[in-house]
Image: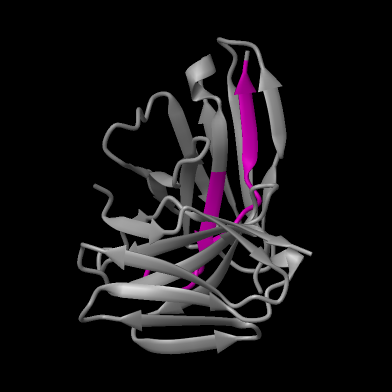
């Protein structure tokens, strides 16, 4: 069992839909990261969270430390949001635990 | 945001040859650089962590004599896959961080290696 689990593994949505990707972790972490991997492989760091909620444009990330759970929300989804979204936990020793990713396809 | 580049983006080589991949931080000094490997449909796996001027720290199961890492300057780290074999075919990604704490990591675009 992975230390970081994501769901769903694959997600197809219609343009404009509200999307939620979930991440649960079983290890102690000091920060949680949401990463976006484009079809060509390049990775962009979207959020780094220690608590609460962060918002950047149409993206919202939340974390519940007690429940060891984080969510990434995309409002008004667009085809350009199609990518793999990766959740990663970082512990105080700076070790990362990566989820296997959620492949999102947004259809026009 | 900060930019990290990798070169080459693609490489195809014959079994037994060595391949060098460069990772550069273009607009900041990277105290720490990380090398990851990603097999198809799998998550990123950390291979090693390198701090400028010191030897890299390899993760368990990663052969340090096969994957040579050099972090000779604050803007450049190289990963050399020595005597590459088909099972080394993978997507290699580097990331760089300005400090040694919880600063944001900036990821490179990755290098696809295919060993024939």
Query: Looking at the image, which residue is at 66% across and 51% down?
Result: B109
Residue B6 x/y as whole percent:
67, 47
Residue A57: % across, % down: 65, 85
Q: Is residue B42 left or right of residue B61?
A: right
Start and end of the magenta stretch? Answer: B93-115
Q: How many marks?
A: 0
Is residue A99 or residue A91 the one in the foreground?
A99
Rendered position, B20 above or below B26: above
Residue nearest the viewer, comparing B71 with A6: A6
Quadrant of residue A108 within the rendered picture = bottom right
Question: What coloring was used for the rendering?
Answer: one colour
The answer to which of B98 and B47 lies nearer the viewer is: B47
Residue A36 in view (yes/no): yes
Is A45 one of the magenta-colored residues?
Answer: no
Quarter of the view holding residue B100: bottom left
> With A64 as the anchor, is B111 left or right in this view?
right
In the rendered image, which quarter contains the N terminus of chain B? bottom right
Q: Nearer the viewer, residue A90 or A17?
A: A17
Q: At x 64% / y 83%, what residue is drawn?
A: A58
What's the residue at 54%, 49% (across, down)? Answer: B94
Q: Going by the image, does B78 lie left or right of A92? A: right
Compared with B86, B89 (above or below) is: below
The answer to whether any part of residue B84 appears in the image is no
Could you tell me which quadrant the C terminus of chain B lies in?
A: top right
Q: Quadrant of residue A50?
A: bottom left
* Residue A94 in the image: above or below residue B88: below
Residue B14: x, y in percent? 64, 11
């Amino acid at each position: 069992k992975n230390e970081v689990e994501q769901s769903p593994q694959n997600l197809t949505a219609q343009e404009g839909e509200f999307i939620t990707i979930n991440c649960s972790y079983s290890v102690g972490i000091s920060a949680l990261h949401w990463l976006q991997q484009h079809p060509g492989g390049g990775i962009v760091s979207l959020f780094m969270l220690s608590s609460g909620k962060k918002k950047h444009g149409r993206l919202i990330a939340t974390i519940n430390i007690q429940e060891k759970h984080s969510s990434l929300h995309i409002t008004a989804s667009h085809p350009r949001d199609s990518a793999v979204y990766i959740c990663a936990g970082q512990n105080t020793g700076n070790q990362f635990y990566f989820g296997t990713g959620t492949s999102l396809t947004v259809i026009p | 945001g900060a930019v990290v580049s990798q070169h080459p983006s693609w490489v195809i080589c014959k079994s037994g040859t060595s391949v060098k991949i460069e990772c550069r931080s273009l607009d900041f000094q990277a105290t720490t650089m990380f090398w990851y490997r990603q097999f198809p449909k799998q998550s990123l796996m950390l291979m090693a962590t390198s701090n400028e001027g010191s030897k890299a720290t390899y993760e368990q199961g990663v052969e340090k004599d096969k994957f040579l890492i050099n972090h000779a300057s604050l803007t450049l780290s190289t990963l050399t896959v020595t005597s590459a074999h088909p099972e080394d075919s993978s997507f290699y990604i580097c990331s760089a961080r300005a400090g040694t704490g919880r600063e944001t990591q900036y990821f490179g675009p990755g290098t696809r290696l295919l060993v024939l």
